[in-house]
Amino acid sequence: AQTVTQSQPEMSVQEAETVTLSCTYDTSESDYYLFWYKQPPSRQMILVIRQEAYKQQNATENRFSVNFQKAAKSFSLKISDSQLGDAAMYFCAYRNSRLRDDKIIFGKGTRLHILP
Amino acid sequence: GAVVSQHPSRVICKSGTSVKIECRSLDFQATTMFWYRQFPKKSLMLMATSNEGSKATYEQGVEKDKFLINHASLTLSTLTVTSAHPEDSSFYICSAPSSVETQYFGPGTRLLVL
């Protein structure tokens, strides 16, 4: 069975600084998707970034980028120029990619605090 | 973009009553929808997979008779919490995949059982 592990329950970063959230996963599949989701106080789940396992290039979305190490099964999220609006719970997630209807498996989350 | 709605957004009910939560995909069809439960400051726990035209698939430890799921159409799934008790109070979230790459989440339903 696939698992997702986030070892940092909480993190803090100064506004405008850079922070990296860690995530490791375990799977025997070779083809899959990895995600970072943001859950602000409204509790609406927001997709931050997505990485397909077959792509070697790390995904980037504006201030958000990932460091995807497939062999090490590591998938960290880097947030550059942190803003107050980045404060939220961040969940690392995994999904097999063979079927559209495969379920998403979430890590336990990391609560990110932005210090003004 | 694609949207998933949930209704109601919050509900308060008395112990022993049943509560129905709706999950709709507004501009795409979903043969599968997922129901999650989230406790305060915790992660999303998958409860069940709702399948249009067939029975739902429940995760281990989730009571099928307590949490009834009906996937009535390609755009609607419902979760009914039967004979609700205070321990059923939680935040319930649904999601639906619109493609292989993308899954959309509803805004969630906060259930409080008195």
Image (cartoon, rainbow, N blue to C red):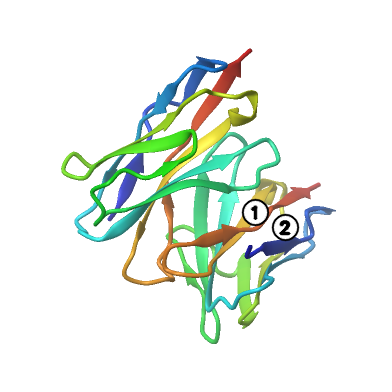
Pointer 2 chain: B
Residue B84, labelled with which disc?
2
Residue A106 horizontal/vertical position (percent): 43, 47
Q: Is residue B89 above or below residue B66?
A: above
- The residue nearer to you, when weighing A61 against A95, is A61
Q: Which secondary structure lies at badge 1?
A: strand
Depth check: give the residue in front, A42 or B18: A42
Residue A33, image quadrant: bottom left
- Report the amino acid beneath label 2: Ala
Dot 1 or dot 2, earlier in sequence: 2
Residue located 54% across and 87% down the image: B53
Left-right relation of A38 to A64: right
Residue B21 pos. (x, y %): 72, 64
How many residues crowd around disc 1 within 10 Å: few (fewer than 14), some, or many (20 or more)?
A: many
The type of residue carrying mark 1 is: Tyr
Is the N terminus of chain B in the top left, top right, bottom left or bottom right quadrant?
Answer: bottom right
Image point 81% across, 47% down: which residue?
Answer: B114
Q: Secondary structure at mark 2?
A: loop
Instruction: Where is residue A67? Give x, y as percent.
Output: 30, 36
Within the image, what quadrant is residue A42 found in?
A: top right
Q: Which mark is residue B92?
A: 1
Dot 2 alpha-carbon crowd within 10 angstroms: few under 14, some 14 to 19, many 20 or more: many
